[in-house]
Image (tube, rainbow, N blue to C red):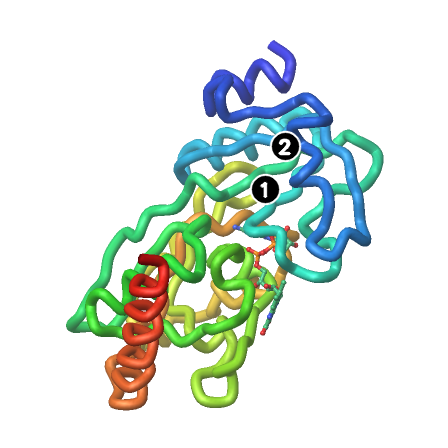
Amino acid sequence: MDLIEQLVAIVGSDNILTAAGDMAPYLLDWRGYYRGAARCLVRPASSEEVSAVVRACSQAGVAMVPQGGNTSLCGASIPDESGEAVLICLSRLNRIRKIDLDNSSITVEAGCLLQAVHEAALAAWRLFPLALAAEGSCQIGGNLSTNAGGVQVIRYGNMRELTLGLEVVLPSGEVWNGLHGLRKDNTGYDLKQLFIGAEGTLGIITGAGAQAFSSAAGQRYLLAGARIAAGRRTSAG
Ligand SMILES: Cc1cc2nc3c(=O)[nH]c(=O)nc-3n(C[C@H](O)[C@H](O)[C@H](O)COP(=O)(O)OP(=O)(O)OC[C@H]3O[C@@H](n4cnc5c(N)ncnc54)[C@H](O)[C@@H]3O)c2cc1C
C-alpha cells in the first residue's frame, strides 16, 4: 500500500483531500502572504487516528504539518512549496472531554475552537480566560503551539500558564499522556512545557487540560459575555 492508501484506511476516504483545488483554502495563510503545496490533507478524528497517521508518515519518511485554525500570522501552518508534506488538520478533534468543577479545570481536544471552549466553560459558570479576536477560528492546539497570549494576558498569563496537562502524539506515533489536572505536580521535568510554543515541531497536541476560573472577575466577564451573546441572538431575530 502506498502512503495515501494507508491514510485512507485510517481516516476514511471522506477525510482525505488530494486535489489541489480542494486543498487550496488550507494552503494559503490568513494574510495571503504564503501559499504552499501538499501531497494530501488528512483529517483524523481522534488521538488514535492522529497516532496512526503520524506513524504511517514517519515510516514513509514524509514531513507533516499540523494545522489548527490557520490564523497564525507567520505562515507556520502552511507546508512549503515542494508538495511533499502531508497536512494534518485537527478540526475533527473537537470534543469537550470534561469540565471538573471541583478542580476548576476543563479538558478538551486540540481541534476545539477557542470560542467553543469559552462557551463550554461559560455554561458551567467558569471562565477560560484566553481571549483573542480570532477565537471563532483558532483552535486550542494552535493556541498551545503558539503559546498565545490575547487581551487578558497580563491578568491570567499565556497558554503556558493556563495549561495543566497535555496529550501529544510524538513523531514515532506514540501517544504521550501528560493529561491531568493536578496543580501541585512536583514530579521531575515539566515535559508539557516543551510542546507549548513549539509550533508542532516536537509532536502533535491532541488534548489539553486547562484552568477554568471561578473568580469574581471571571463571573463579571461571564455575565458581560452572556449579555453580549443574548444581544446577538436578539438582533439575529
Ligand atoms: C484577528 C486575529 C487576532 C489575533 N490576536 C492574537 C492575540 O491577541 N494574541 C496572540 O497570541 N495571537 C493572536 N493571533 C494569532 C493567532 O490567532 C494565534 O497564534 C492562534 O493561537 C493560532 O491558532 P490556530 O489554531 O489558528 O493555529 P494555526 O495557525 O493553525 O497553527 C499555528 C502553529 O501551530 C501548529 N499547530 C496547530 N495545531 C497544532 C496541534 N494540534 N499540535 C501541534 N502543532 C499545532 C501549526 O503547525 C503552526 O505552526 C491573532 C490572529 C488573528 C487573525
Residue in the picture at 49% in, 71% down: 159
Q: Which mark is residue 171?
A: 1
Q: Is residue 42 left or right of residue 80?
A: left
Left or right placement of residue 108 versus residue 194 in this view: left
Q: Secondary structure at mark 1?
A: loop
Along the line of sight, the residue nearer the viewer: 58 or 219: 219
User: Where, quadrant-wise, is the C terminus in this rendering?
Assistant: bottom left
Give the percent coordinates (x, y) of residue 85.
Answer: 72, 34
Q: Is residue 132 left or right of residue 229?
A: right
Mark 2 or mark 1: whose residue is earlier in sequence:
2
Which residue is located at x 72 percent, y 46 percent? 78
Residue 58 disc label: 2
Res. 175 image quadrant: top left
Residue visible at 54% across and 45% down in the picture? 170
State the image quarter where residue 57 is shown.
top right
- Image coords of residue 226 (percent x, y): 28, 73
CB within 8 Å, label 2 to label 1: yes
Q: Residue furthest top?
A: 1
Name the residue rendered at 49%, 21% in the picture: 14
At label 1, counting other C-alpha atoms closer than 10 Å, the crowd grade (few under 14, some 14-19, many 20 or more) is some
Ligand 1 falls in which quarter? bottom right
Camera-nearest residue between 190 and 139? 139
Coordinates of residue 139 in the picture (x, y in percent): 49, 55
